[in-house]
Amino acid sequence: MTQNKPQKDYLAEPVRDFIAATAARTPTPGGGSVAGVVGALAAALGEMSLNYTRGKKKFAAHEEHYAQVAPRLARARGMFEDLVADDVAAYELYCKATAMPDGDEKDAAVQVALAASIDVPREAAKLALALLGDLQGLADKCSRWLVSDLLAAAALAVATVRLCDYNVRINTPALDDAGQAAELRESSADDVKHAVRVHGQMERQLRETLP
């Protein structure tokens, strides 16, 4: 009896190796895994901006806000890291389903795998939007020297939402339920618009600090 090979932990590898693995002629890590890494970096930059700001006398009035946001940013970073593995697992599930003998059982398995391949980016997009909300909340509570990092975090969060949208759009045409597929694409497109809007608001809000 053969045992399933353990799933590779790409985040345990050096950054150079992850980049090389992404460049290699292998299906994983691909766009979904990269989206998870980009989201984790967005959260990490937000954490850095907060950590360098909190504790300073000038921002003492915001300490309660920092205490609430800090654990959310750390939790988001961890969740994005978990989504990297979830994306790989969803793809492996799809590969196993498509390798099954033709028939109703295979068709059902493929639909389950497709659902998983869509659920992961949808979850990542929602997480990125929540992260954007916290980053926007820090815009007027952040040291001016960290504003560029805060906006970079927001830009990465927007990129995460876009990457997730691409994954949704590539997978939904294969769903049996055309109506559900259309709803998923519309919801995903709305998330992209919302993310872009929030980032634009932050840039306008911080225009004096970052001309």
Image: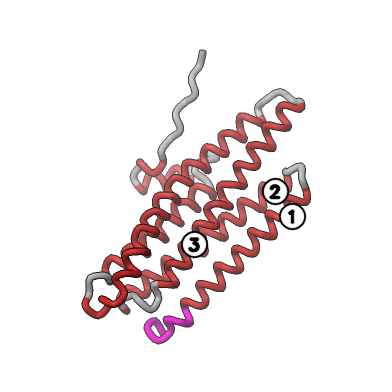
Q: What element carries label 2?
A: helix
Query: Are the residues tagged 1 and 2 within 8 Å (C-beta)?
Result: yes
Figure quadrant of residue 94: top right
Position in image of residue 178 (x %, y %): 78, 49
Q: What residue type is labelled 1?
A: Ala
- Furthest-top residue in this view: 1
Residue at horizontal 39 percent and vertical 44 percent from the top: 11
The residue stretch that appears in magenta: 203-211
- Disc 1 designates what residue? 182
Q: Is the magenta stretch mostly helix, strand or loop?
A: loop
Distance CA(mark 3)–CA(mark 2):
24 Å
- Disc 2 designates what residue? 172
Distance CA(mark 1)–CA(mark 3):
24 Å
Q: Is mark 3 on a helix, strand or loop?
A: helix
- Disc 3 designates what residue? 130
Q: Give the total number of marks visible in the rendering.
A: 3
